[in-house]
Image (cartoon, grey):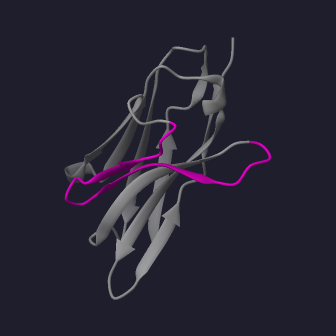
Amino acid sequence: QVQLVESGGGLVQPGESLRLSCAASGSIANIYRMGWYRQAPGKQRELVATITNNDSTNYADSVRGRFTISRDNAKSTVHLQMNSLKPEDTADYYCNVRIRTILYYDYWGQGTRVTVSS
């Protein structure tokens, strides 16, 4: 089992920044990928950004150039630096960890709310 603890959400104005963090613990020896997804009210959960264990990153088109994902392997922590936030970035943000053994297993955090509003 993997436990994920997220932090860093909140209320900001358009154009401001936030930094989300997610710390993983438990059976984390085989982490393959860490990342963030988000779900806005009335919409499906969507990928925001991911980073693999060899630091390969992937971003949604809507956030590329504004958000940066990074990973601290020693602390099994993933961060999402969000700059130039827009009202459409408002959502619940979920940390995701993918474990690779023979199969892949996904674990999710409890979610942290980001609200961008003037």
Instruction: Give the magenta range.
Output: 41-62
The reply, left or right, for residue 86 in relation to residue 80 is right
Across and down, in percent, residue 5 comes to: 48, 49
Across and down, in percent, residue 114 comes to: 61, 32
Which residue in the rendered view is the most extreme toward the right?
42
Q: Residue at x 50, y 32 (%)?
A: 8
The image quadrant that residue 12 belongs to is: top right
The reply, left or right, for residue 5 in relation to residue 101 is right
Across and down, in percent, residue 92 comes to: 64, 42
Rendered-image quadrant of the N terminus: bottom left
Q: Is residue 113 above or below residue 66?
A: below
> How many tags in the picture?
0
Is residue 18 rendered magenta in the image?
no
Is residue 54 rendered magenta in the image?
yes
Q: Is residue 7 above or below residue 118?
A: below
The image quadrant that residue 97 belongs to is: bottom left
Rendered-image quadrant of the C terminus: top right
Which residue in the rendered view is the most extreme toward the bottom?
102
Q: Residue at x 20, y 51 (%)?
A: 74
Q: Is residue 89 above or below residue 60?
A: above
Across and down, in percent, residue 6 comes to: 50, 44
Q: Is residue 101 above or below residue 92?
A: below
Closest to the observer: 5 or 9? Answer: 9
Q: Residue at x 19, y 59 (%)?
A: 54
